[in-house]
């Protein structure tokens, strides 16, 4: 840099904070604009429970070589490994499945996916168009002799192992590309003292303007201009790190308009829904040693999973998860109706005498104007190349980061973190 170049980073999620921190270390003048009244984006730790409770991102996926773990070790942040095998799975009537039955169900699930993979390979050889993963599963399972309960159990496995992982109905996932991408090896873990520790440490010493919702991003050969409701900022470069859901909603106007291929990629990709209802009780009435409590519902994808926070916090707290279309349906319900639905499931499992919760929280990431959902997925007719297209700069002034710009690690905190560093390095090389 012959002079101190300036950069505006739009969004104070982990991607934006990572980009800003790296650029500042290179000597750039950086301003971060954030529409919320807090930093962290889809990392949101609620500290009003006496213990940290994650309303957004919870886990670090794959600890071996993961940059989030590198930072955690550098800053001496405590982590706790999650054992997903420590699962107490209850059938539709609430009875715990025997271990042998759980093993058999999981084997059936993987067998179904193997047959789906064979089907997709045949389709690919014949140059057939993409279909949804659910359509492929239905083709495969139609040849199996399954009772209604067998199908319910398989639907549970699909919801738990796929739909909750990708924050989308299998009916919306691409059969060709749904599981593209890479993973770090090793266990998953969480931060028992709060994911926000990572956020606040990355954000140290940054100039962050909260409640500055960006409305327009103008860019030309000589620089950028970013317009908020009550303020305008100018700089040499801009890095846009808002979630895919915000780009899909058109909340930010780009002038000139983004290239056609980028706009098409934005709308081909899917923005998933994964919501939580956090319930605190007077006492523990469930299996204290369990990490995950599973339930095989009558209707696919409804209340299939509760995470036991007692295991890591010692407090009587359960977190219910819902994904995809059911998660979005619940967003239109009142908090009270959502809690009642969760309690109906818990009372099916543990009996009518289960006490009411003393405190609760409900998330609605899809309705959040600064998120538009939980994280991205490869929808039917999308490909992983769309992630690359979204990541491409526009000219030499406008750049993009965030988990939905990471072809390798989409839908993860580490994908977002790495994308922020990637774009900071890209600006630095151009400057």
Image (cartoon, helix red, strand yellow):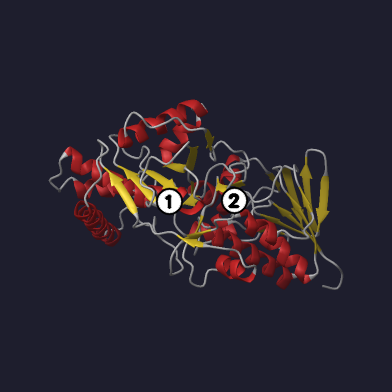
Q: Residue at x 32, y 36 (%)?
A: 350
The secondary element bearing badge 2 is classed as loop
Q: Give the mark nearest the N terminus, 1 or 2.
A: 2
Q: Residue at x 62, y 38 (%)?
A: 369
- Residue 9 is drawn in which quadrant? bottom right
Residue at which label 2 appears:
43
How many callouts does the rendering have?
2
Quadrant, the C terminus: bottom right
Q: Residue at x 59, y 70 (%)?
A: 73
Residue 254 located left or right of residue 288: right
Q: Position of residue 40 (x, y in %)?
A: 65, 51
Residue 379 located left or right of residue 85: right
The secondary element bearing badge 1 is classed as helix
Determine contact: label 1, label 2, CB under 8 Å.
Answer: no
Of 72 and 213, which appears nearest the observer? 72
Q: Relative to 313, does residue 29 appear above or below in the rendering?
A: below
Q: Position of residue 298 (x, y in %)?
A: 27, 34
Residue 415 visible? The answer is: yes
Residue 204 located left or right of residue 270: right
Q: Nearer the viewer, mark 1 or mark 2?
A: 2
Q: Position of residue 392 (x, y in %)?
A: 60, 61
Give the label on residue 166, or none. Answer: 1
Of 290 and 137, which appears nearest the observer? 290
Q: CA distance from mark 1 to mark 2?
A: 17 Å
Q: Position of residue 69 (x, y in %)?
A: 55, 67
- Residue 74 is drawn in which quadrant? bottom right
């Amino acid at each position: 840099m012959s002079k101190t170049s300036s950069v505006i980073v739009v969004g104070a999620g982990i991607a934006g904070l990572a980009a800003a921190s790296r650029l500042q270390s290179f000597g750039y003048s950086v301003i971060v604009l954030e529409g919320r009244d807090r930093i962290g984006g889809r990392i949101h730790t609620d500290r009003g429970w006496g213990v940290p409770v994650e309303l957004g991102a919870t886990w670090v996926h794959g600890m071996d070589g993961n940059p989030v773990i590198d930072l955690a070790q550098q800053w001496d942040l405590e982590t706790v490994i999650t054992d997903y095998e420590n699962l107490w799975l209850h059938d539709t009537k609430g009875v715990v499945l025997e271990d042998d039955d759980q093993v058999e169900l999981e084997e059936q699930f993987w067998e179904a996916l193997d047959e789906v993979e064979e089907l997709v390979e045949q389709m690919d050889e014949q140059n057939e168009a993409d279909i949804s993963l659910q359509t492929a599963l239905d083709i495969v399972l139609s040849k199996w002799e399954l009772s209604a309960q067998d199908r319910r159990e398989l639907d549970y496995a699909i919801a738990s192992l796929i739909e909750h992982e990708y924050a989308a109905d299998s009916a919306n996932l691409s059969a060709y590309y749904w599981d593209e991408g890479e993973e770090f090896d090793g266990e998953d873990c969480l931060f028992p003292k709060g994911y926000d520790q990572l956020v606040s440490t990355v954000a140290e010493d940054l100039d962050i303007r909260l409640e500055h919702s960006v409305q327009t991003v103008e860019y030309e050969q000589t620089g950028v201009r970013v317009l908020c409701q009550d303020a305008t900022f100018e700089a040499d470069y801009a890095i846009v790190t808002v979630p895919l859901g915000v780009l899909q909603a058109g909340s930010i106007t780009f002038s000139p308009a983004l290239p056609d291929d980028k706009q098409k990629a934005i709308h081909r990709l899917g923005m998933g829904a994964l919501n939580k209802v956090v319930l605190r009780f007077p006492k523990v009435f469930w299996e204290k040693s369990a990490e995950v409590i599973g339930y095989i519902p009558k209707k696919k994808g409804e209340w299939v999973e509760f995470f036991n926070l007692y295991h890591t916090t010692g407090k009587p707290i359960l977190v219910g998860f819902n994904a995809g279309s059911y998660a979005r349906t619940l967003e239109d319900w009142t908090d009270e109706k959502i809690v009642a639905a969760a309690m109906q499931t818990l009372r099916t499992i543990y009996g009518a005498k289960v006490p009411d919760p003393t405190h609760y929280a409900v998330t609605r990431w899809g309705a959040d104007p600064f998120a538009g959902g939980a994280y991205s997925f490869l929808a039917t007719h999308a490909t992983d190349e769309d992630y690359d297209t979204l990541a491409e700069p526009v000219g030499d002034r406008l750049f993009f980061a965030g988990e939905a710009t990471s072809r390798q690690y989409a839908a993860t905190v580490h994908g977002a973190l790495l994308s922020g560093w990637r774009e900071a390095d890209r600006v630095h090389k151009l400057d």
